[in-house]
Every structure is written in C-alpha cells, then in structure tokens.
Amino acid sequence: MNFDEFTGEVQHRLELPGTGEAVRAIRATLTTLGQRIPEGNAEDLAASLPMEIKWYLTGAVHEHGQRFDWTEFVGRVSEIEGIERSDAAYHAQVIVDLVSSLVPDSDVQQLRNQLPEAEDDENWRKLFAVLDAGGWQEQEA
C-alpha cells in the first residue's frame, strides 16, 4: 500500500471530507504512538508502512518511550488533530487497525507488549477495540 492508498483508506474509513484531514489524523495518532513506545519498536512497526507514513512513528518523534496513560494519549491526539477527545479516540482505533492489517502480527503483538497497561488497564485496550472486534468492516450503503 502506498501513501495515497493509505491516506485514502483512512479518509474513507473515518468518512473525512478531504486528504488533509486524513493526513492530520494519521500524523496525530502515529506521532503520539511513536512517543509512547521505544524507538526500536516504533521502527519495527513502521518498517512495513509507506515511507511518508513511517516518518510519523519515527522521524517526527523527538523522545520515544514516554510513559503516559490512555487519557494523555487521547488528549495528545485530540490536540494535534484539533478535534474532540471522543473523535480522537475513534480515529486512533481505526488508524491502529489499518496499521495492524499492514504489518506482521509479531509487530502488532510487540506494540501490545509495549503498552503494559493493556493487560491491566481497560482503557489501553480501547486502542485495539476495532482490531479485537475482528477488524474494520465496510458498512453497507
């Protein structure tokens, strides 16, 4: 999948009006995720993504491995994207689901392992809600 296909898929899944909004959602989610996980894990996760997308997980992040909870994660995504927190949480779920469909399962498991609260904290599990529900399904018109 190339950059245009990736952004187009995000735009479609999130029903966003334009490519700019899709890129903003991708940047907000993946930059914040890159801040949360260690640099090596971000690079592993990014390896299967289009070059322009992988940059958000790696090159755009100045400090990897920061420790913050789900509430802070959603707050950062919301602030970067300029949208309500509930929308930011949903956007992050959909984007993580798309990323998960493009990377090896081992990298998705590694991501889960880098969020140790995911085992103990119901909130971090929300990041994987779409994935755990069996993936995104296109709604019938």
Image: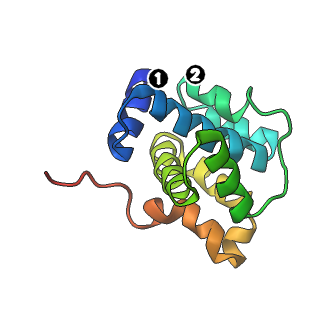
Q: Which residue is mark 2?
A: 52
Residue 5 falls in image quadrant: top left
Between 12 and 107, the residue placed more toward the observer is 12
* Label 2: which secondary element: helix
> Which residue shows up at 16% across the image and 54% down it?
140
> Which residue shows up at 50% across the image and 48% down it?
100
> Which residue shows up at 65% across the image and 40% down it?
80
Judged left or right of residue 125, residue 91 is left
* Rendering coords of residue 55 (x, y %): 66, 26
* Rendering coords of residue 101 (x, y %): 45, 45
> Does residue 76 appear in the picture of this structure?
yes
Up-down relation of residue 84 to residue 132 (above or below): above
> Does residue 37 appear in the picture of this structure?
no
Structural crowding at the residue carrying mark 2, measured as other residues with C-alpha within 10 Å and reported as few (<14), some (14–19) or many (≥20): few
| Residue 3, disc | 1
Of the 4 image quadrants, the one containing the N terminus is: top left
Residue 82 falls in image quadrant: top right
Residue 119 falls in image quadrant: bottom right
* Rendering coords of residue 111 (x, y %): 66, 53
> Which residue shows up at 55% across the image and 33% down it?
24
Q: Residue furthest left?
A: 141
Q: N-terminal of the two: label 1 or label 2? A: 1
Up-down relation of residue 34 to residue 89 (above or below): above
Amino acid type for the residue under numbered disc 2: Glu
